[in-house]
Amino acid sequence: MKSDIEIAQAAEPWPIEKVAAAADFQPEEVLPYGREKAKIERKEPVDRDQFGKLVLVTSINPTPAGEGKSTVAVGLADAMQQAGQRTMLALREPSLGPVMGMKGGATGGGYSQVIPMDDINLHFTGDFHALTVAQNTLVALIDNSIYQGNPLNLDPRQIIVKRVLDVNDRDLRHIVIGLGGRTSGVPREGSFEITAASEMMAILTLSTDLADLKRRINRIVVGYTYDRQPVTVAELGVGGALATLLKDAILPNLVQTISHTPALIHGGPFANIAQGTNSIQATQLALQQADYTVTEAGFGADLGGEKFLDVKTPLLGKHPDAIVVVATVRALKMHGGLAKDQLDHEDLDALHKGLANLGRHLHSMKRYGIPVVVAVNRFTNDTEAELQMVVDYSNEHDVPAYPADVWGQGGNGARELAAGVIAAADQPANFTPLYEPTDDVETKLNRIVTQIYGGQGVELEPKAQKQLRQLVDQGWDHLPVIVAKTQYSLTDDAKRLGAPTDFKIHIREFVPKLGAGFIVAMAGSILTMPGLPKHPAAEKIEITDDGTISGLY
């Protein structure tokens, strides 16, 4: 059996100019990055009257290996294209940290991939590097301001923006900088985040154009003065410089699937520690060009799904016409209590217990008033009895379900799923947000926990209580809330699988991200700089003397 990278390397990609022409982009809008990648630069304003239909792909709570959500999104888009529907993908860019860490690549799999997969998974068009430089330049400018007499009266203990790297590196979570004497800066404690968790990444993905990007960068709160007053990038006077560093990164990237379906891949915030969606610009561009846009949100419906609907949708100016919840038999059996090394064997009892997790996500997505479909991503060891149990359970909840073999068959393995999604998207929707902007922060949090996670509410630790009072005093409590928590559980405890209800979410800290336009609520022990596993994926990656890559996944 061929590996994903072997399948991708055997594909016959179109020149990117041909992909762009098939998607109706004008030649002057296409800025090629080699033969198979391009940036798209459109100067005309967005015309929402031209928007096609939007399909959001999300999932149940995943296992550590992931459940193939991106693979399903790619296979679904290919199947819709093959069915004669003008379709485009709008996906996130992979982060190098997980590529070299636990997860491996993030461009789909098997015969449902976006290509060139090696380029996309590695450096792509340099967007992550530009974001890393912009964020680190900002922090360097802050430290320089403190060193050069501190005209803004910044308290070095209250700097809240962090340096970033697109690397999983636990040793950088807590550091001390400025050591070495007076010529080496002002000593203070600091830390690194992974680039995908940075506010600069969130801003890039939520900006509608370059002017909006600059406005958002200027709103970033970098820290506080000694008398607890916020200091912004605008007060530093460097917003223009930082926006300049991102002038190319803000442009969406065009590539293709193995079957030549156009794909806009742009931005890559994680859904467990950020909003987990691709860029507003790429999604709007796809909506203008295609009859159907297939997009995804990171991790489960409790994280990326909720954040797409409550944070991205109002800015996008368009709600999804259908929601696809991806489930796998193996993940559901794990939620039913089965050990990871037993997932390849039929176990209907464990599957039956684990279906409660799927039920929770179906309930939470249906409450938004949008038609929902279940995609059962089929694996080799799934039995017909197990697949039928998932289909029957979904039907009992008034949600159609379709097994799909998109890894092995590409779009051909998702024909029934595509037909079901098209039918669902044609149904009327009555989109109902989870909360109103005027709701206070605790109300927003309690609605997320009770209506999406199925829990009993939130508990604020003393530090979070103090920070919440400060948010209210500053008038920031009208902003949407991003909950940062584990992706493996509906709770803030990664080991509590299934669909528990006897829990509260524990908020330890609030972080204002005014540039992005939301408040981050840090729950449980979630970290914004991941570490590497005992045997990282990097151990399997090789390159031959002629430049052929293997082991990427």
Image (tube, rainbow, N blue to C red):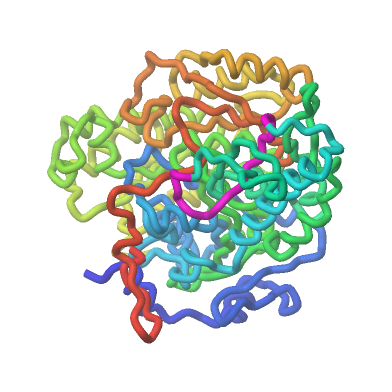
Quadrant of the rendering where the C terminus is positioned: bottom left
The reply to whether the magenta stretch includes residue 160 is yes
Instruction: Identify whether 224 is placed above or below 135.
Output: above
Give the residue drawn at x 61%, y 31%. 520
Quick one: 237 or 324, which is closer to the camera? 237
- Image coordinates of residue 373 in percent, x first then y, are 43, 42
Q: Is residue 392 left or right of residue 195?
A: left
Magenta region: 157-171
- Image coordinates of residue 512 in percent, x first then y, are 68, 31
Instruction: Identify whether 157 is placed above or below 541.
Output: above
Quick one: 460 or 422, which is closer to the camera? 460
**Number of numbered discs overlaid on the protein picture:** 0
Give the residue drawn at x 61%, y 66%. 253
Quick one: 132 or 260, which is closer to the camera? 132
Q: Is residue 532 visible?
A: yes
- Residue farthest toward the bottom in the current orientation of the protein: 546
- Image coordinates of residue 257 in percent, x first then y, are 47, 69
Instruction: Identify whether 546 is placed above or below 219.
Output: below
Quadrant of the rendering where the N terminus is positioned: bottom left
Q: Is residue 262 left or right of residue 283?
A: left
Give the residue drawn at x 44%, y 70%. 118
